[in-house]
Image (cartoon, helix red, strand yellow):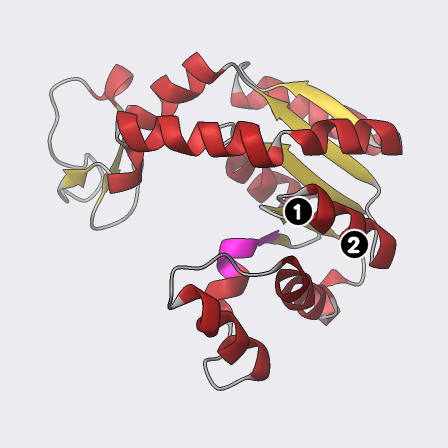
Amino acid sequence: MRIVLLGAPGAGKGSQAKSLSERYNVPHISTGDIFRALKPDSELGQLFAQYASKGQLVPDEVVLRIVKERLDQDDCKNGFILDGFPRTIPQAEAFEREIGSDVALNFDVDNSILMDRLTGRWTCKECGVPYHKSTMGDITKCTRCGGELYQRKDDTAETVANRLKVYDEQTKPLIDFYAKQGTLKNLDAAKSISEVYEKIVQILDNL
């Protein structure tokens, strides 16, 4: 089962991917994890570093090579859940031509909800447990380990607004691309985690 996840930052893709990975025994693969796992002395690692070190966008053909190398590993023989790739139409065209997917799940959430989700996120510095301002009350320490709570720099209102703008401009067109492919499934990701999960399972079990 080869699954592509679509959706803006904060739409809930990562949370669902973890549960789906366990249920269907296929790896959850995020491009961020792939890039971080690149060996600095490998050909692809050095190629990636040439662009990343200068703050330049990594060309589509390089990203595709990196993704393909990861998908060639043994744990992907029965499929994968791809999160964060493809990001652009050229990437999607090349990926579907050379590898292909069975379904594209689109996590649809209004931007106003995403702003609230992301700007309200706080995390424990010690154990990584997530919190949200709407439910954390007056606490300043983690209720699990006592660690300090902090807000990521990319979860400020200005940064979140820019991230959503970039998504709308560069990645949102993928929704139309996969709709034309006939593999797009839309999800109302503003619903609860359990409701979204049940809908995804219903979709995937019927493939």
Judging by the rendered image, the residue that carries numbered circle 2 is 94
**Range drawn in magenta:** 29-33
Residue occupying the point 17% across, 38% down: 149
Whether residue 58 is visible, yes or no, is yes
Residue occupying the point 75% across, 35% down: 104
Q: Is residue 32 magenta?
A: yes
Residue occupying the point 84% across, 32% down: 183
The secondary structure type at the circle numbered 2 is: helix
Q: Residues within 10 Å of mark 1 (few under 14, many from 20)?
A: many
Task: Point out which mark residue 203 bears.
Answer: none
Quadrant of the rendering where the C terminus is positioned = top right
Marks 2 & 1, CB-CB < 8 Å contact: yes
Q: Position of residue 70 (x, y in %)?
A: 66, 67
Say what amino acid the circle numbered 1 marks.
Answer: Pro
Whether residue 206 is visible, yes or no, is no
Decide if residue 61 is on the left or right side of residue 57.
right
Q: 67 or 21, which lies in front?
A: 67
Say what amino acid the circle numbered 2 marks.
Answer: Ala
Q: Is residue 146 above or below residue 9?
A: below
Q: Position of residue 145 (x, y in %)?
A: 19, 44
Decide if residue 158 is on the left or right side of residue 163.
left
Judging by the rendered image, the residue that carries numbered circle 1 is 86
Dot in front, 2 or 1: 2
Q: Is residue 4 magenta?
A: no
